[in-house]
Image (tube, grey):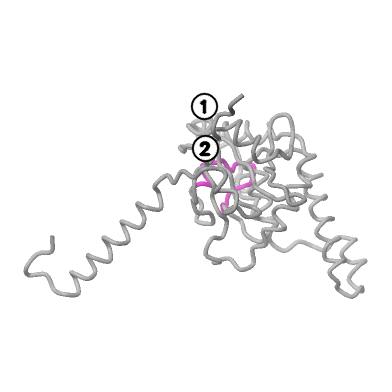
Amino acid sequence: MTPKNASPDSASRSRELHLSLDSASRSLTRNVVPPERAQAWLRDADLFLVQTGGPIPWLGRGLHGHVATFARWGGEPFVLETRPGGGRAVPLDAFLRRNPSRVDVFRPNPDGRWPEYRPEKCVAFLRRALSARYGWRGVCSAALARLPFVRLLWRDDYFNDGDVSTQYKPKTFFEIATDFLTPTCERERLDEIWRFDRELQRRASLHCAEARALADRYAGVDPVPWLNDRFVEPADLARSPFYRYQFTFAPFPKRRD
């Protein structure tokens, strides 16, 4: 209720604040959608965050413990993910049946605030990253970094070097040798593949959140600035302003024999 002595400007500001709080609360409400309807809303590079329970969500102070990415492969809906057994592409139906009512969908760059972002590059990197081993080293490093006084033993650049790779670097021999060539789409594609493979060989292994953060960075935007990709957790991606919650998959109806 607005006080009697309040000015019209203050009353309008209070109404605007109330409306903004209402819209914010609505955006945080869990929107459960049947899989049959939700598949038409999905786009390539949509972020899947899975509510797994266990130590990872607890350490990350969030709800999610696993990260995956939606992509259409040959027109069919697939989910690209990195698990302890290695990277794999799983049909969407099989992925949802394995995680009933626990998959939250987040959209990268929903309002186009980052025009330099290219979702097709994110998907291309994750497809090539399916051959990488699971990054147990990154999981252990993220866990050790939360222990008291352990972080003091590491240098700051060990945590921040995920952003250093986006800064200027001296040209490689391959880049110098191809500078005289006329830029073409084919040359740009080969250069991207060269950079992807070189980064994957350097990393050798990736965990699920690290793979997604690295893929988005190659697509043009670092979703968690000033944090090494190795230390990115699912809760960091859920809190990033680069993503926005869309809906949660409802469980599939039980099959009738």
Q: Is residue 216 above or below residue 250?
A: below
Residue at (54% x, 50% y) in the render: 106
Answer with mark 1 or mark 2, whichever residue precedes in sequence.
1
Q: Nearer the viewer, residue 104 or 207?
A: 104
Please state the horizontal and vertical placement of residue 139, each as a whole percent of the image.
63, 33
Q: Is residue 76 above or below residue 113?
A: above
Pointers 1 and 2 in contact (CB under 8 A)?
no
Q: Is residue 205 above or below residue 45?
A: above
Q: What's the amino acid at mark 1? A: Gly
Residue at (69% x, 43% y) in the render: 80
Magenta stretch contains residue 226: yes
Q: How many badges with numbers are in the image?
A: 2
Region in magenta:
224-238
Residue at (72% x, 34% y) in the render: 134
Q: Determine crowd level at label 2: few under 14, some 14-19, many 20+ residues with C-alpha closer than 10 A.
A: many
- Location of the N terminus by quadrant is bottom left
Q: What residue would you read off at disc 1?
A: 54
Please state the horizontal and vertical placement of residue 78, each as a whole percent of the image.
69, 44
Label 2 secondary element: loop
Of all residues, the one furthest to the front in this rendering is 257
Q: What residue would you read off at disc 2?
A: 64
